[in-house]
Image: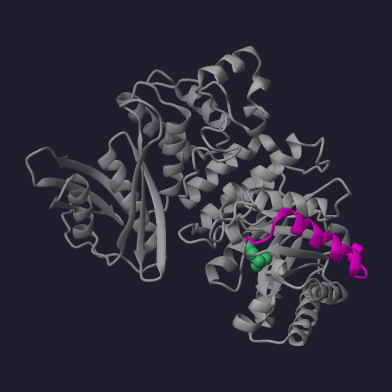
Amino acid sequence: MTDTASRPTPSPERVLIFDTTLRDGEQCPGATMTFEEKLAVAEMLDGMGVDIIEAGFPIASNGDFEAVAEIARRTKRAVIAGLARAVPADIVRAGEAVRFAARGRIHTFVSTSPIHLAHQMRKSEDEVLEIIQKTVAQARDLVEDVEWSAMDATRTPIDYLCRCVEAAIRAGATTINLPDTVGYATPDEYRAMFRAVRERVPDADKAVFSVHCHNDLGLAIANSLAGIEGGARQVECTINGIGERAGNAALEEIVMALRTRADVLPYATGIDTTQIMRASKLVAAATHFPVQYNKAVVGRNAFAHESGIHQDGMLKNQSTYEIMTPESVGVQKTSLVMGKHSGRAAFRSKLEEMGYRLSDNQFQDAFERFKALADRKKNVYDEDIEALVDENLATAHDRIRLVSLTVIAGTRGPQRATMRLDIEGRLVTEEADGNGPVDAVFNAIHALVPHEAKLELYDVHAVTEGTDAQAEVSVRLRQAERSVTARGADPDTLVASAKAYLAALNKLLAGATRLHAQHAAAE
Ligand code: KIV
Ligand code: ZN
């Protein structure tokens, strides 16, 4: 059991940040992260001041269990939470995973709305009340810090919701989460729900109340802020707002709204906001979910000014068109231009400035790739460096690697790709034709690594500006129920396409048995 003193207690002005990127975020289609990626994200969240990290759903798979347990072992500061349904086996498994944490939490939930009770759970209100009492008490026997969530709280009649919350607090829940599971509430309704529950439930002041908002109607941030006004002192959110369906409330938006509008929202968080951009990029790279250009706070246009009137205002005074500084979220206004004359020291300091901490081997690899890129490209921008380092980290454990690719393209087809791969140490080569150069490249991969996966998405965009910009390609593959998305970057669009496809294939193959190349042509 962890001791009571270790539980985070908010002062009236302090709002706890509960990040669920690794659980609700990772749960959304295509956002699966590898074990190493999850550890890197957890380290980042802990370092930036997140109070509670929901590290996963331990009963969901052995991989999820191992990730939660390892994050629990490694994390120095934040509370580590594991999710559990209101089922005894789930709670035992979550308890086993978080017991390694300096501060561990079991987060258990059950649906409370009539729609869920009738159609999903097929249980009566009294049966659910009994489940709440038993499962919260079971969790509380394992850890001191227990969060209980009323799934679909916002579609639950207030009288019944109050009875459920009362049962959970009586059974020992220390945090009560009232999620807007389906993103249905309006801010006024959400604020009123918290006020009513906190006024009506006996001993409500013994628990911390929490908001958890989904963005189906684009109201997740407005609702979260309204919930805080209604008395909640914990906010559940994800980096970049990733999550089920339209996503969860974005951490960076909540934190910057509270900071920027402290005049009307006098609540503080413990987040070091200068790490926000880095966290956004790390999660985008790990999940392969690109951040939309006009996304609040972390979109690439969030601090860009194009129109003449805006530029004129900005030149006279930054506050004319910026309500927060780019530096406050870790965006550097000026980009130090790196090129082929830059040496190791400049590259190392650039990486440090960008928040990367690489081992000697990782640094050496990244430096060689940077030099190769600088030879081909006039200016190497921060985004280029990020793309090459992130790709380097992501491919460290790959089983299939691209060795070389030559493509014959042009007006007179068929287009032909000659590809050489390293498959678990064996070099293999294949030539394939296609209806266009990308098709030829993907056909060559198919010939070398036969697989059933279907291509669901192929998307190309430029990382920076100019005709020598790096192309960034996203590929999504689906095999049966599993869908994975991966990115590849290179100044050559076809090489970027091959890298992206192979990265997706590597993700699908992670954990599969040894590969057998179709055509072995060892050197
Ligand atoms: O949206 C939701 O209701 C959830 C619960 C598991 C807390 O994610
Ligand atoms: Zn959710």
Is residue 193 one of those drawn in magenta?
yes
Tell me where residue 198 appears, x and y as whole percent.
Answer: 87, 63
Tell me where residue 52 appears, x and y as whole percent.
Answer: 72, 55
In the image, which residues are magenta? 183-207
Please say if 69 is above or below 285: below
Residue drawn where x is 19% and y is 63% of the image: 518
Q: Is residue 60 left or right of residue 437?
A: right
Q: Is residue 141 left or right of residue 314?
A: right
Please say if 118 is above or below 6: below
Q: Is residue 285 left or right of residue 443?
A: right
Residue placed most toward the observer, 372 or 265: 265
Please say if 440 is above or below 189: above
Q: Quadrant of residue 124?
A: bottom right
Residue drawn where x is 65% and y is 43% of the image: 252
Residue placed most toward the observer, 123 or 8: 123
Residue drawn where x is 78% and y is 82% of the image: 129
Report whether residue 89 is seen. yes
Is residue 342 one of those drawn in magenta?
no
Tell me where residue 514 appears, x and y as whole percent.
Answer: 32, 66
Tell me where residue 132 appears, x and y as whole percent.
Answer: 77, 79
Question: In the rendered view of the protein, which quadrant contains the N terminus?
Answer: bottom right
The single residue placed furthest to the left in the displayed view is: 412
Q: Quadrant of ligand 1?
A: bottom right
Q: Quadrant of residue 319?
A: top right
Coloring basis for residues: one colour
Q: Main SS type for the magenta part?
A: helix
Please say if 360 is above or below 377: below
